[in-house]
Amino acid sequence: MMPDDPFSRQRAFISTSVSTPIFPTSPSPSSSFSSDRRRSTASPRPASIPLRSSHSPSPSSSATSRHALTPSTFIHNSRFAFALVPAALFLLDLGGTAVFTILTLGLAAAYFFDSVRFSIPSFLSIWVSLVLSQVAFFFSSASSLSLSSLPLTALSLLLCAETTFLIGVWASVNFRWIQIEHPAISISLERLLFACVPIAIPSLFTWAVVSAVGMPNASYYYMIFSCLFYWVFSIPRTSSFKKGNAEPSILGQLESCFHSLYILFAPVLFHIGSHHATIFSSWSSVCELLLLFFIPFLFQLYASTRGALWWVSTDNHQIHRIRVVNGAVAVIVVVLCLEVRVIFHSFAKYLHAPPPLNYILVTVVMLGGAVGLGAHMVGMVSDAASSLAFTALTMLVSAAGAIVVGFPILFIPLPMIAGFCFARFFTRKSLSSYFTFVALATLMVLWFVVHNYWDLNIWLAAMPLKTLTKYLVLGIMLAMAVPGLTLLPLKFRFIMELGLIGHALLLCYIEDKLFNHAAMYYFGYDEEVVYPSYAVMVTTFLGLAIVRRMSVDMRIGSKAGWILTCLYCSKISMLFIASKSVVWVSAVLLLAVTPPLLLYKDRSKGVSKMKMWQGYAHAGVVALSAWFCLETIFEALQWLQGRPPSDSLLLGSYILLSGIACLPIVALHFSHSQLAKRLLLLVIATGLLLVTMQPPLSLSWVFRSKLIQMAHQSNDDISIYGYTLAGPTWPSWLLISTVILTLASITSIIPIKYIAELRALYSITVGVTLGIYIAVQYFFGALMLYPLLITTVTCASVFVVFTHLPSASSTRVLPWVFAMLVALFPVTYLFEGQLRARGFVANAEGEQEADRFSTMLAIQGARLSLLGLYAAIFMLIALVIKFDLAALLHEKAGSNTQTSRAQPHSLPKTRLFQQRRKTATPSLTIKRLSAEAAWMPLIGNISTILCFLICLTLNITLTGSSNRAIFFIAPILLLLNQDSDIISGFGDRQRYFPVTIVVSSYLVLVALYRIWEEVFWTGDHDSWGGLDIGGPGWLFVVKNLALLILTLPNHILLNRFMWDYVKQTDAMLLLTMPLNLPSIVITDVLTIRVLGLLGIIYSLAQYLISRRIRIAGMQYI
């Protein structure tokens, strides 16, 4: 045994962060002083993230870190999903079908390997698929990325490749075997992700947004995404793999420093690069440049309260001074730039003070407001003097703002009083002062609206501008009242909840009008006014953030949070569905669907808090809400199809929507109820069938809507496409009923498993409905075949049902049912092929040759359809018998194992219960099979052979003996069973022999036929084909026959091996395998080349199988 060397342990488990450069904050070179200072000084970073030590770890600390590197679940998947999943979707959109296909196949292979617990092949499949998809991306997206500049194109491709690499790293870090076998690699991959994602992903997100909305504001989008991902990834986070005393932080000082420099300079450099021609053309352009630097700078100073600047200093007081001084400078610059770029650029017409007084007043308002807000946020308003200064500043800002917008000088004390009350609320939490401020501020807002908009004769958002301003003033008043309502006692919390709900309803109404009625009318002119989509998104997410924050702080109840969440989420629907009432419809539907998700959160294990009657009530409310959405569903379907949907499609979409909306009820609260799951399955299946089949249906007697009636009265489809001839659609109801009955029986809603009479009724009903559907839909006009087809399908249904669920007498009746089914096959084919054909020929004597040819094609198509129907029936019977026989053998093996392991004494009640369970359902035992159902293997073999022969006939008729078809037809013979009549010596060891022998024989016969067809036959009985016209002669025959014979040894050896599994010598395989090479290289017949390739594959397969059997035998010995 090797000695346990502590230094080797230290090298094996050394932290990856030791190699990170350290930025010293003290000039003292003493490491001990530095470490003591770090211990004694508080850090701005969170307490769970200890500081890095600059000295080398001792063996004891290394041993501690070794135990700290424990494998665990990667806890940051949600963060990387937020960043990398949209990036991957954008890359898929750029790459196209080729990239999507490669990724689908690669991820399917990875999922398969992972499901069978092959971790390394799954890991390799992911990386190979990503590499191949990136190669395909380079070629498929070359046209879309062909930018004007070659360096930009190269940078774009490199950015896409880096994103693909990060996706692969994210997938790799989730493999647990890497965490167990290579813990240092897991830590490095985690660190790599946190270091690279905030750099690469903002550029890709900006690219996507610019592709959608254009380039003018790209720098600001880039700045927003950079700050967002800085907050998500650059704030110190706890590592997933470092536990215990080890340092749990992920990023080092170098990465944190680089991220800080990135958000400060990357947006500025991007703006300079994209606007270099006009960067200093005006003061507005200069202000844009300063804003792009100082806004991220202010954001980073705010993030320093969460430990973002831990790499600068470890002294809290020093960080606070940095934050205050730099924040003051940044606020001044940002305020001045906003004045130039926003206030005087866009709102100059509302500034009624003359220059230069307007510049001074606006500066006082903005700068004073920013200083006061910043002082309160950093906690500088804490004593009497600072409170007095804050109050004076607030009054000054209020008075200056009132003067600059033109408020009458006589009433200037009102805004000063409002500012005083506002400051008093912040310093003393006085509710009376705050509501006084709300009242005065509302009066001033009302004066501003009346002074600027009240006399304008303009219609906006389908209402007069005067009405719209009333709604806006009401919304502003409610928004201002909410902060004061939060301080009310708990028993008055409902007032704040009502205020929030009222504000959300008003916001939904205003945005719905502005977005869906984007027109402005004034003085006889119409003008399109577009309410931006990003405004809807901003108000939605801001509202959701406020609701979540107030719910976490327990300021609103769960029901109010539920209603507000549904109202804010319903606004998003207007971005995707062009309907006038989509917001309210979505709100009603969300209010009906989300209670199981948001109101029943305290669920104990295995027990539902929702009672049964509540579940039914919620399901009924969901159904009514979905019915309320019917017009919106109609408009959505009309937009998707380009024409009005049928009533059956509308009803199916309604039922499908209701079923999907009930999924949370069943999944979260009634997962233990099988009846609920089965009913939900039937509802969803019914909706899908109605959507897919679209049977004839009229909803006019149930639902009357002017919108739907007007859409159906349009004759656009007829005027464009004309009248189309279609077959009967009523049989689709029969297929729907057949599928619904089958699902109901499978899920035991219809108890056919326990009642033989019900089983017989079910099988006959399903057979009749399915037979009528097949007869009418696929054999339209052949009335003489209808009784035979219905009888055939009914016999098949009865046989399949009673074979799988036998009754007391079914084992004696089913052979006669199968005999009748087999007898109906030639009879039906005779009616279709002979009598019907003669009738058509007799009636077509006066028809033209083209019509007669079309008639014969129709007859041939009907014959092939009939053969396909019988092939499917025999395939189904063979599958059912094979499944039942395998289940019986498995049950016998299991019963033998349980009997050998069972205890000799058991409780009488347990034995009685097991006996009742066994006799409750019909079953075939091995003894009963040998006594009464010995026909099952024979009938299964007959069905398999008939299905194989019919498929072979279809192959010869449709494809002319295709070489590829046999590889799909031959596996049918895997359904053969061992019986005592047809295949007496056939067992489980020989189950692959029929497949290989049939493939070899078929290809040999096809090769002989191709040679004969090429040389001797041209369709003329008096001609010798190629010999008469100078084509291929005897040399062709002899050469290809000899090459065909050379391919036979490997086929013969493999088929013998598939029968007896007797190992051949390696010399025999090595000698026979090269015989196939001439057949592959110099043959003139494609089938012989296929035989040669198959011979080589057979030889290799035989060698590998023999080797595996030998190794398994040696291991057993």
Image (cartoon, rainbow, N blue to C red):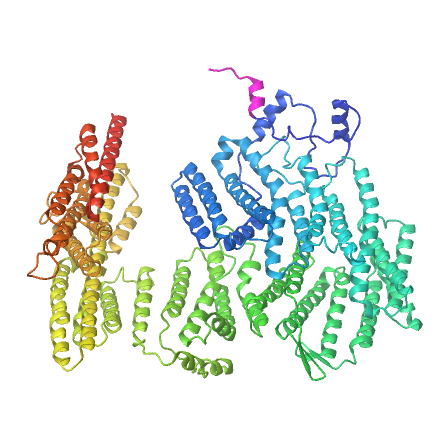
Left or right? Give the position of 320 relative to 100: right
**Which quadrant: the C terminus?**
top left
Residue 942, placed above or below residue 679: above
- The residue that appears at 6% across and 61% down in the rendered structure is 1022
- The residue that appears at 64% across and 37% down in the rendered structure is 251
Please provide the residue range marked out in magenta: 1-12
Taking the view exactly as shown, the residue that stands out farthest to the right is: 410
Residue 244, placed above or below residue 811: above
Taking the view exactly as shown, the residue that stands out farthest to the left is: 1022
Residue 281: x %, y % from top left: 78, 57
Taking the view exactly as shown, the residue that stands out farthest to the front is: 1030
Left or right? Give the position of 644 relative to 859: right
Residue 922 visible from this viewpoint: yes
Left or right? Give the position of 182 relative to 312: left
Residue 395: x %, y % from top left: 89, 61
Looking at this view, is 634 or 666 the one in front? 634
Determine if the magenta segment contains residue 11: yes
Determine if the magenta segment contains residue 524: no
